[in-house]
Amino acid sequence: MPEVRVDEVRRFMVDSLLAAGAPESEAKAHADLLLYADTVGHFSHGLNRLELYVNDIKGGMTHPERKPVVLKESPATAWVDGMDTLGATAANFCMDLAIKKAKECGVGWVAAKRTNHFGMAGYWAMKAEKEGLIGLAFTNSAPIMIPTRSKESACGTNPLALAAPALKGDSLLVDMATTTAAMGKIEMQIHKNEPIPEGWALGPDNKVTTDAQLAFDTAKLLPLGGLEKTSGHKGYCLNTMVEIFCSGLSGSNPTFKVPGWSFSQDVAPDLGQCFAAIDPGCFAPGFAQRVAECLMHWRNLEPIDPSLPVLAPGDKERNNREATLKKGTITYPQGQIDSYYRMAKKIGIKPLTVV
Amino acid sequence: MPEVRVDEVRRFMVDSLLAAGAPESEAKAHADLLLYADTVGHFSHGLNRLELYVNDIKGGMTHPERKPVVLKESPATAWVDGMDTLGATAANFCMDLAIKKAKECGVGWVAAKRTNHFGMAGYWAMKAEKEGLIGLAFTNSAPIMIPTRSKESACGTNPLALAAPALKGDSLLVDMATTTAAMGKIEMQIHKNEPIPEGWALGPDNKVTTDAQLAFDTAKLLPLGGLEKTSGHKGYCLNTMVEIFCSGLSGSNPTFKVPGWSFSQDVAPDLGQCFAAIDPGCFAPGFAQRVAECLMHWRNLEPIDPSLPVLAPGDKERNNREATLKKGTITYPQGQIDSYYRMAKKIGIKPLTVV
């Protein structure tokens, strides 16, 4: 498969967003977000989505030139209007505010309405982690998951993320959709022509399916836990927790009113997002040391299969990123390269240069 | 099965804790906590555990006469020493503090070390919900869950709870262990002589077992999601998030050092617990209305099986509680009544009067 240099991917992402009409600072911020996802191996949230963002700007659903606005504030909280800016613009604004508040009074909790897709939730949690804080990030999304017992999809993949600093640059990173699997994973099974495990999704007959294409077309993902007997209702509960933090606090669209994200979408999604930072310095001394001890303990557990070591949350992403940066290139499917060649021609920028 | 009047169960719980040495206010507070669990149908966390609490006091592991102490404070946070008091004593202290701080600056985030088992996590989240706030509660616990890929148990059931107010006394309540199933559910399958579903636990061969007794004896619960192919690593991630909030912030024992809770335990568990309150009044107006709309939307979804309506998180517990209070009695297994008859004789209180 074609390889593209990491800096060339970033160049292409920035050029695309600039050509669509984003200011340079926001094009760069958003490119950093998407590029990060590709370097850690979350390909569904990287270059894969660039064209949707470009389309949203060109279609007037996203307004990259605007600035988010604080609508209400208390020492530890803020309510923000994301103004339908690019995902990274509102998320940087909100997390910066949460970090500032956490440094001032221990916790910063910020909820924003009228936001756009903000990529990997973990990227935003890590922004606080780099400041020595616990970071949290949540977003709602279009309805694609069935609440336990329901025939209809009514919940999003509603991810949650937490990042916490350990010692020497090490950290714990939780970054997970509250569905069993993200739609991107089902797409990967289609590409590989392989079935999906039981417990990922229902078919049109409302029974569990292992047919990846059928699962994709039906769009009835199961919550984390799968069916009720294996505690799928807990994943549904978790999903509603994210909803409360997002649309509940911000007054955005609740998930069941969020339009699906596609090239035919013609309104802004008005997503709800929530960003929080907590200063561990306000609690028992030695937080980073304790996180480090937990990470060490988990990583040193004896694995069932010696070839599959026990990981701490975030290790997979960190390992992928180190390998990618060392190699200096990212591998994309030929179809994606071709599709972005066409986009480049259409918007008048230099296509991606394959190594 | 024997029935006991609700007020008689409370009388017995209070008398037991008083006889063990608890002050009246704390005996009552702790009885309310345990009784609540039985009225909502979480029998594992109610009368079932009373004798363990009594034993902990009599053995000198729990000190019901002490008061928790604030060790460090900022406008939105507090670090508390639970002083090995009864679970309800420290939890009431911490959640009251979180509520006060949330009312003052939007968020209150309190972490406590040297705490004891605090029963149903949701009970504490609801304490904030009754004040019109979002409530959150977390606790770590003894190691009983295997991190994904691990041979050994190293994580607890580490539950998380969130409660949010809706309209007219209605609310959303998330209250879940981050394991697929709690040990209490496996015990219930043993009593019914029925297998457990695949995905709940591993056997001694580190393979999924459906044998309830084997699962109980092995004590290798799977995280929410089950095995890695059905995203059990997400349940493991969630579990570590709770750990970070609990032992991470408070400096208590991390789960892997928490002693198992039994009659042979001879040291205080030094659990870590975390309580938070968020004031929705600091965000978009109309929070309760929006929560109500979500609850309504989910409840009105067409169910796959018409006899199993779609529930909103917390509906099952609310329905159980209403039915219990209407009936006025709680049903317990005969074995439990017999066992508490023996305890009553031993500590010199009036046994439970069965209807």
Image (cartoon, coloured by chain):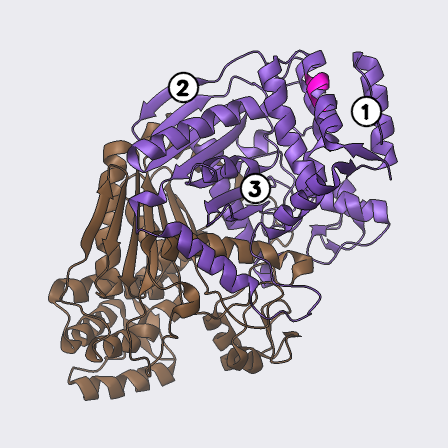
Chain colours: A brown, B purple
What residue is shown with label 3?
A: B159
Circles 3, 1 touching at the beta carbon (< 8 Å): no
Q: Position of residue B343 (x, y in %)?
A: 81, 20
Circle on res. B70: 2
Task: Choose the circle earlier in sequence order: 3 or 1.
Answer: 3
Give the vertical position of B229 relative to A104 (above or below).
below
Task: Choose the circle earlier in sequence order: 2 or 1.
Answer: 2
Q: Amino acid at mark 3?
A: Pro
Q: Secondary structure at mark 3?
A: loop
Circle on res. A234: none
Q: Circle 3 marks a residue in which chain?
A: B
Task: Choose the circle earlier in sequence order: 2 or 3.
Answer: 2
Q: Amino acid at mark 2?
A: Val
Is A260 covered by the magenta stretch? no
The alpha-carbon separation of the residues under discs 3 and 1 comes to 31 Å
Q: Quadrant of the C terminus of chain B?
A: top right
Question: On the picture, is B188 further left or further right than A121?
Answer: right
For the residues carrying marks 3 and 1, which lies nearer the camera in this image?
A: 1
Q: Secondary structure at mark 1?
A: loop
Whether labels 2 and 3 belong to a single chain: the reply is yes
Residue B321, visible in the rendered structure? yes
What residue is shown with label 1?
A: B352
Crowding at dot 2, Cα within 10 Å, few <14 / some 14-19 / many 20+, comes out as some
Instruction: Report the number of numbered marks.
Output: 3
Whether labels 3 and 1 belong to a single chain: the reply is yes
Crowding at dot 3, Cα within 10 Å, few <14 / some 14-19 / many 20+, comes out as many
Q: Quadrant of the N terminus of chain B?
A: top right
